[in-house]
C-alpha cells in the first residue's frame, strides 16, 4: 500500500497544481476557462458558478482559493494537511467533504484523498496522492447541460460517482487474483509467497473498506440533511452513488471473508502435508526398527545361542526379518501411512 504524498514533500510530478478553472452559466452552458483572479468577478455576476480542480496545491494557492470563495480557515487547514478521515462538515451555507480514493499503480494498490469544497455557486476539488483526474466527470457534465443547470450539485454527484466507479475495476482485479491464489493454495507445493500475498490483499481490502464504508453515510447526509444544496431532482442520482458504494462495500466484505477462509485453508493444508510426511517417516522408522531389534541379538556375545550351530540359522533369521518387515509394510500400506 502506498500512502498519499505528505503535504511538505517536494512534488515529483510535472502535473500543474491548477488542473481546471471553468465558469458556467445557470443554464449549464460553459462560459470558458478563467484565471483564479477572475473567480470573484465571475461570482459577482448573477446566475453563474465556478468549478475548480486542484492537484496537491501548496499553501499559497489554497490561501488564494480561500480568498476567492471565502472558505473557512479550518477547511483550508484540513485540505493543506491531507491525511484526513472520510467526513462531511458544514460551514455556513457550504460543505467540506473528504473522500478517500484508490488506484492500482503497477499492480500495487495506492490510496489518496480528495477534498471537496461545495457551495451554492462553486465546486472545488483538491486531489492528493493516488487519484485520477476528474476531467472525464467534468466532460460528462458538460455534455448534459440540462442536468448541469442544477448547479455545482450535479458536478458533486459526477465527482462522487467517478470515485466510486473507479473502485469497481479494483474490486474486479482483486476477485480475479483471489481465484488465481485459490489454485496456488491447492497446488502440490507450498509457496510462502502465496501466504504473503493473501495477507497483503487482506490488509489492502481492510483499508479499502475503511475508505468506502463512510462514503455511504456521507451520501445519505447529503440527501437527507442538505436539501438546500442537493435539489430533489438530483437526489435519485445521489442514491445511485450510494447503491454503487454499497455494492463495492459488500464485494469487499465478501472477498475479505474469502481471503480469511483461504488463509485458514492454506494453513490447514500445510499442517496436513506435514502430517503426511511425518506418517511416512514414522512408517519407515517402524520398518527399520524391526530388523534392528532382531539383528541386535547377534551382538550380545552369548556363548550358547541355538541358531549359531545350525546351518539354516542365518537364512532363517533373514526370512523372519523379511516377513516382519513385509507385514509391517502391508499394515501401514493398508492404513494409508505409506
Image: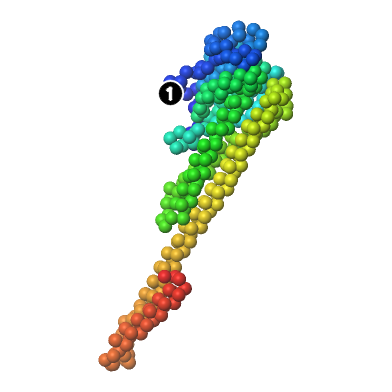
Q: Residue furthest left?
A: 311
Tag 1's secondary structure?
loop
Q: Identify which residue is drawn at 30% across, 89% down.
A: 313
Q: Identify which residue is drawn at 48% across, 51% down.
A: 182
Q: Can residue 83 be seen in the rendering of this structure?
A: no
Q: Residues within 10 Å of mark 1 (few under 14, many from 20)?
A: few
Give percent across and percent down for residue 71.
63, 16
Give percent across and percent down for residue 1.
49, 36
Q: How is the image coloured?
A: rainbow
Reading the image, the residue beneath label 1 is: 12
Q: Is residue 234 above or below residue 255?
A: above
Q: Can residue 106 be seen in the rendering of this structure?
A: yes
> On the rendered image, what quadrant is the C terminus found in?
bottom left
Q: Is residue 242 above or below residue 302?
A: above
Camera-side residue of 285 and 192: 192
Quadrant in the picture for residue 286: bottom left
Asked if residue 194 lies left or right of residue 82, the reply is: left
Q: Is residue 41 above or below residue 161?
A: above
Q: Identify which residue is drawn at 56% across, 33% down.
A: 165
Quadrant in the picture for residue 114: top right
Q: How many marks?
A: 1
Give percent across and percent down for residue 156.
62, 24
Camera-side residue of 39 and 24: 24
Give percent across and percent down for residue 298.
32, 83
Amino acid at each position: 500500500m502506498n500512502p498519499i504524498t505528505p503535504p511538505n514533500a517536494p512534488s515529483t510530478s510535472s502535473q500543474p497544481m491548477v488542473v481546471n478553472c471553468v465558469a458556467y452559466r445557470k443554464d449549464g452552458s460553459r462560459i470558458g476557462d478563467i484565471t483564479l483572479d477572475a473567480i470573484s468577478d465571475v461570482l459577482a455576476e448573477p446566475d453563474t458558478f465556478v468549478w475548480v480542480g486542484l492537484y496537491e496545491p501548496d499553501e499559497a494557492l489554497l490561501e488564494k482559493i480561500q480568498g476567492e470563495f471565502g472558505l473557512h480557515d479550518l477547511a483550508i487547514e484540513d485540505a493543506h494537511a491531507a491525511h484526513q478521515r472520510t467526513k462531511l462538515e458544514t460551514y455556513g451555507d457550504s460543505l467540506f467533504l473528504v473522500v478517500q480514493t484508490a488506484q492500482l499503480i503497477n499492480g500495487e494498490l495506492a490510496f489518496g484523498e480528495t477534498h471537496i469544497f461545495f457551495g451554492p455557486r462553486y465546486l472545488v476539488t483538491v486531489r492528493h496522492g493516488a487519484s485520477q483526474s476528474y476531467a472525464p466527470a467534468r466532460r460528462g457534465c458538460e455534455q448534459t447541460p440540462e442536468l448541469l443547470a442544477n448547479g455545482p450539485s450535479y458536478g458533486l454527484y459526477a465527482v462522487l460517482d467517478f470515485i466510486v466507479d473507479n473502485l469497481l475495476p479494483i474490486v474486479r482485479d482483486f476477485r480475479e487474483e483471489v481465484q488465481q491464489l485459490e489454485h496456488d493454495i491447492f497446488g502440490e507445493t507450498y509457496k510462502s509467497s502465496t501466504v504473503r500475498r493473501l495477507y497483503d490483499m487482506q490488509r489492502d481490502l481492510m483499508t479499502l473498506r475503511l475508505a468506502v464504508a463512510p462514503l455511504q453515510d456521507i451520501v445519505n447526509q447529503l440527501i437527507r440533511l442538505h436539501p438546500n444544496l442537493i435539489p430533489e431532482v438530483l437526489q435519485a442520482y445521489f442514491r445511485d452513488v450510494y447503491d454503487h458504494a454499497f455494492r463495492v462495500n459488500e464485494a469487499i466484505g465478501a472477498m475479505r471473508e474469502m481471503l480469511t477462509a483461504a488463509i485458514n485453508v492454506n494453513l490447514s493444508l500445510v499442517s496436513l502435508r506435514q502430517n503426511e510426511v511425518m506418517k511416512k517417516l514414522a512408517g519407515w522408522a517402524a520398518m527399520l526398527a524391526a530388523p534392528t531389534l532382531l539383528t541386535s541379538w547377534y551382538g550380545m556375545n552369548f556363548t550358547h545361542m541355538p541358531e549359531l550351530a545350525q546351518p539354516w540359522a542365518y537364512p532363517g533369521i533373514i526370512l523372519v526379518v523379511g516377513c516382519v518387515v513385509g507385514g509391517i509394510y502391508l499394515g501401514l500400506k493398508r492404513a494409508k501411512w505409506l
